Image (cartoon, rainbow, N blue to C red):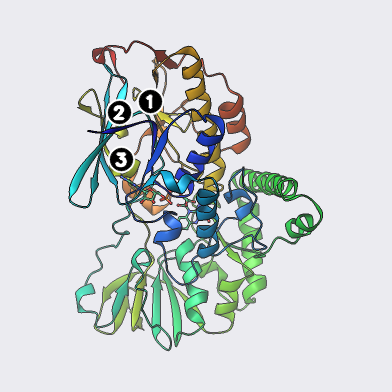
Amino acid sequence: MSEHFDVLIVGAGLSGIGAAHHLIRRCPQKSYAILEGRDAIGGTWDLFRYPGIRSDSDMYTMGYSFRPWTDPKAIADGASILNYVRDTAREAGIDRHIRFNTRVTRANWSSDSATWTVEARREDETVRFTCNFLFMCSGYYRYSAGYLPDFPGAERFMGTIIHPQAWPADLDYAGKRIVVIGSGATAVTLVPELAKTAAHLTMLQRSPTYIVSRPGEDALANWLKRRLPAKLAYFITRWRLVLLGMWFYRLCKKKPEQVKALIAKGVRAELGDAFDVATHFSPRYNPWDQRLCLVPDSDLFKAIKSGRASVVTDTIELFTESGLRLRSGAELDADIIVSATGLVLEVLGGVQISVDGAPMDFSKTLNYRGAMYSSVPNLASAFGYTNASWTLKCDLTCEYVCRLLNRMERRGLRQVMPRNRDPDMGTQPWVDFSSGYFHRSIHLLPKQGSKRPWKLYQNYALDILNLRYGRLDDGVLEFSNPVSAPAERAA
Ligand SMILES: Cc1cc2nc3c(=O)[nH]c(=O)nc-3n(C[C@H](O)[C@H](O)[C@H](O)COP(=O)(O)OP(=O)(O)OC[C@H]3O[C@@H](n4cnc5c(N)ncnc54)[C@H](O)[C@@H]3O)c2cc1C
């Protein structure tokens, strides 16, 4: 026997809890459950436990549209974010709808019954559910392990090698010599925190990242909070920061040289003219070609300036018994090496999805409005922005899914699917980003189209128009009842 729900949400992270909240509010008549592979709410913010874990975007845009972020910190620590997600789930009663330890492995759409049959592993057994709509809020990376390059000689190293995705709770790093490999958000978070008690901390990067310091607390936001009702203060701050972010992103794309110079000037002001900014903080790419790293209250720069941390820009030749040998010939001694080398992307939670028994290859699908996939019925996924906070887009996707469900309910329709009929539609990579983890997996990811509604603009204002107000009957979405024959489908 399988349980049936109108909507099944996969994942109880920031997106899955947000999706349930939108559903309760906008489609109160729909039954739903959340299937979560782990034993906890929070996804990323529960999984990652490395010292200093925090957001690198402000919480006024990373918080939900419906729940003000009231903590004074704008760049918040992982525990506060986790509490925010958990409180949202508890207060709305969403936590009672979550099936924990239920890892979805397969989902098959049946056109005859207009239902998904979803299979999941729970301990040693396979459990089955059916639903009318499948909402994938499963994040974008593999949970079982992060990306660890094949480091030559790693087995010889006598110390400890750690990936931040699996930080040992009992690791004692006080007084130890630590090398953090990487220069992304995780590395720049770890460095100032570990440097507080380590004997010395070296951030070893193959190439630099753009790093910008910003106050950990937003003074204007906190001033507004003291004077206005929480929702109004949140609304104003959120829009101020959204517009500021959009303006800065545009500036980076239009005048990259000007922004490069501005960022370099900021770093020089932090570290002094004697510091080699050109080598260690001047990336080869343009600002926002990869994710820009925010550090709160100059914490990274303060750690470097104090001498507790240093930056080395070089390539690893091999691991030795006592540390690392670099291509320049330099040696770095270490007791602990932290490989902050990133994530392994995973499409739709690693679930094998099929339509009428035919397995779907998502790399051959086109992403529709950043929410659905060509020729895949009754399925949406929450995937956030790469150039702004994740939740801004996920909130809009949830609104869109609710609009769709309500429209179908009103018209008595049971199936909806975007189909590309434009022979001139070009395809492009899903994500216009040169970061290593996207490049490693780009061949597995869905594509975006060259035109609306298949093109992703990574632009919140445009997405509000498209997803909140755009026409549902756009000639691309096919509503059907009864079902169309499987043979008609084409990507
Ligand atoms: C270290 C780190 C810092 C970040 N900082 C920021 C930031 O500052 N700002 C920002 O905008 N973004 C940030 N991100 C991106 C971040 O992942 C998102 O902001 C957000 O937390 C993603 O939420 P999510 O619910 O979509 O996915 P996740 O948090 O990944 O949650 C997905 C959930 O789905 C579950 N799941 C996955 N597959 C299955 C399956 N097959 N069956 C059942 N359950 C499944 C997982 O167990 C998990 O609980 C960061 C990411 C990382 C890794």
Spatial CA span between label 1 and label 3: 24 Å
| Labelled disc at residue 443 | 3
Residue 136, image quadrant: top left
Q: Is residue 341 left or right of residue 123?
A: right
- In this view of the protein, which residue sits in the foreground, 275 or 134? 134
User: In the displayed image of the protein, which residue is found farthest to the left?
Assistant: 124
User: Nearer the N terminus, badge 3 or badge 2?
Assistant: 2
Q: Residue at x 45, y 64 (%)?
A: 186
Whether residue 445 is visible here, answered yes or no, is yes
Q: Amino acid at mark 2?
A: Trp
User: Nearer the N terminus, badge 1 or badge 3?
Assistant: 1
Residue for badge 2: 116
Residue for badge 1: 378
Quadrant position of the C terminus in the picture:
top left
Q: Is residue 369 left or right of residue 344?
A: right
Q: Residue at x 52, y 75 (%)?
A: 192
